[in-house]
Image (cartoon, rainbow, N blue to C red):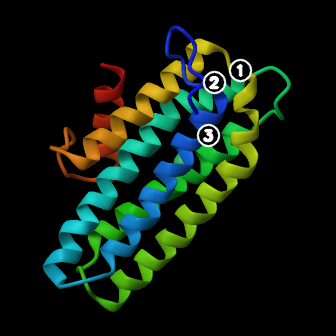
């Protein structure tokens, strides 16, 4: 992890580490959304949904397009993952319509966690092995976007809470800015 070149371009291994660390952060955020008082759970759920919006925006902006252009990678890897991300938007927007703490809400949160876990595992097995094929510019963009998300979620979040597609759109604008 110390093998940075002169331009501080992250290595493929460092990028893989950053993606899996962010997936770990998401798993922990799901746990927090189901633990503690109702108020704690509501706060934790908002943080979870903000994190998911920023993470998916970062991937849609940097990871998936880079892999789609990466030479030698299986065609369509990014497309499958992007279809799962569109499905996630629907699951979250349905969750946001339900009363927090209701039976339906808890069922929907469980469905969402299962879908997001499946999606992250699929990314880790299908996409991360291809990161070695990316050029320095692409690795730099991915590294910067993931770092921005990890930093933002720990501090004052730059994304106002709202519907999930609005948060993804705002996250994309923020990351691209
Ligand atoms: Fe993703
Ligand atoms: Fe991901």
Q: Is residue 157 left or right of residue 139?
A: left
Q: Earlier in the sequence, mark 3 or mark 1?
A: 3
* Disc 2 element: helix
Q: Quadrant of residue 69?
A: top right
In this view of the protein, which residue sits in the foreground, 20 or 99?
Answer: 20
Q: Compared with residue 57, is residue 102 higher up or lower down, i.e. above or below?
A: below
The Cα–Cα distance between marks 2 and 1, rounded to whole angstroms, is 5 Å
Q: Within 8 Å of ligand 1, the CB of disc 1? A: no
Report the residue at 69% width, 46% height from top: 80
- For marks 3 and 1, give the one nearer the viewer: 3
Q: Is residue 95 left or right of residue 46?
A: right
Residue carrying label 2: 66
Where does residue 107 sit, x and y in percent of width and height?
Answer: 43, 84
Residue carrying label 3: 16
Q: Compared with residue 121, is residue 74 higher up or lower down, i.e. above or below?
A: above
Residue carrying label 1: 69
Where does residue 111 sit, x and y in percent of width and height?
Answer: 50, 75
Mark 1 surroundings: few (<14), some (14-19) or many (≥20) residues within 10 A: few
Query: Do the residues bearing badges 2 and 1 touch, measured as CB atoms within 8 Å?
Result: yes
Q: Compared with residue 6, is residue 42 higher up or lower down, i.e. above or below?
A: below
Mark 2 surroundings: few (<14), some (14-19) or many (≥20) residues within 10 A: many
Where does residue 42 sit, x and y in percent of width and height?
Answer: 20, 72
Report the residue at 49% width, 70% height from top: 113
Q: Within 8 Å of ligand 1, the CB of disc 2? A: no
């Amino acid at each position: 992890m110390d093998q940075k070149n002169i331009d501080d371009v992250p290595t493929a291994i460092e990028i893989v580490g950053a993606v899996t660390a962010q997936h770990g952060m998401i798993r922990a955020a799901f746990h927090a959304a189901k633990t503690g008082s109702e108020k704690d759970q509501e706060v934790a759920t908002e943080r979870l949904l903000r994190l998911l919006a920023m993470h998916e925006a970062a991937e849609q902006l940097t990871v998936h397009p880079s892999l789609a252009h990466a030479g030698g990678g299986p065609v369509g890897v990014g497309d499958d993952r992007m279809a799962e991300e569109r499905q996630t938007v629907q699951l979250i927007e349905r969750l946001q319509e339900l009363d927090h703490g209701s039976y339906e809400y808890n069922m929907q949160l469980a469905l969402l966690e299962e879908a997001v876990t499946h999606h992250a595992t699929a990314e880790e097995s299908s996409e991360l092995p291809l990161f070695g094929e990316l050029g320095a510019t692409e690795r730099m963009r991915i590294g910067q976007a993931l770092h921005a998300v990890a930093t933002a979620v720990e501090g004052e979040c730059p994304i106002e809470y709202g519907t999930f597609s609005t948060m993804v759109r705002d996250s994309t604008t923020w990351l691209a800015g």
